[in-house]
Amino acid sequence: MTRTAIVLGTAAIALAVVAAAASRSFPQSAPRTVPCSEIIDSTNWPYIGSRNPRYRYRPVLGVVSVPPAYISQIVHLDAGAWPSWSKAGLVVRAGLGPVTVSVPLAWRKRAAITWGGNTGIVTSLRILQCGSDPSRGNAYAGGFYLRSRSACLPLIFRAGGRSTTVRFGLGRRCR
C-alpha cells in the first residue's frame, strides 16, 4: 500500500467519524414552520384553559401556554410508526415569537409532535409571530405521538433568545 493510499484512507475514516458525531449532535432537518394561516382560534392571554388546576394550561417563557403536566387520555392507533397519540392544543401569545418547540435528540426515536394544520409528524417546529395584540393568544391544534403507551416527555421551548424544558406526563404522571 502506498503512502498516499494510507493518508487518504486515514482522512476518509476521520471524516466519517466527524460526520457521525455531527449527525448525533444536531437535528437532522430544520424545524417545520407553522404559518399564521394555521391558527384555529383566538383567545384571551394568558390562556389557562380549565378553572380546575389539574387541567390548566401552563405559561412558558411568557410567550406560550402549554398543556397540563398530566394528560391521561392516550389514543391507541391501529397501525403505523406512532401507535399512541394524545391530542392537546397549544396557544402562542399574539405579537410575540417566533416560538420553537423541539423533542430532545435522545427522545426523537420515541416521541414526535404536531401543531398547526399541515405540520405532519415532526420532532421540531417553529411557530411564526402572528397578530399584534399581546392581550390575545393564537391557538393551534395538535398534540403528541409516542411509540410506547405512555411517557414522561420533555420538550424544549425557545423564544426571544431564551429556552426551557417542560415535561408532559402522557398516560402517566411525571415525578
Image (cartoon, helix red, strand yellow):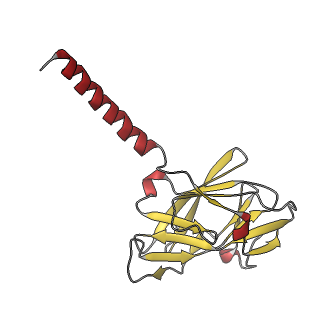
Lateral position of residue 145 relative to residue 39, left or right: left
Q: Pick whichever, 73 or 31, lies toward us.
A: 31
- In the image, residue 2 above or below residue 17: above
Lateral position of residue 83 relative to residue 55, left or right: left
Residue 7, how many percent across, how many down?
Answer: 24, 20
Q: Residue at x 27, y 31 (%)?
A: 13
Quarter of the picture holding the N terminus: top left
Q: Residue furthest left?
A: 1
Lateral position of residue 52 relative to residue 108, left or right: right
Residue 30, how many percent across, how many down?
Answer: 55, 51
Residue 154 seen anywhere in this rendered image of the structure: yes
Q: Residue furthest top?
A: 3
Residue 2, how many percent across, how many down?
Answer: 15, 17
Q: How many marks?
A: 0
Q: Residue at x 63, y 51 (%)?
A: 164
Specify the quadrant of the image occupied by residue 93. bottom right
- In the image, residue 154 above or below residue 142: above
Specify the quadrant of the image occupied by residue 96. bottom right
Q: Residue at x 50, y 51 (%)?
A: 29
Residue 46 seen anywhere in this rendered image of the structure: no
Residue 77, how many percent across, how many down?
Answer: 43, 82
Specify the quadrant of the image occupied by residue 6. top left
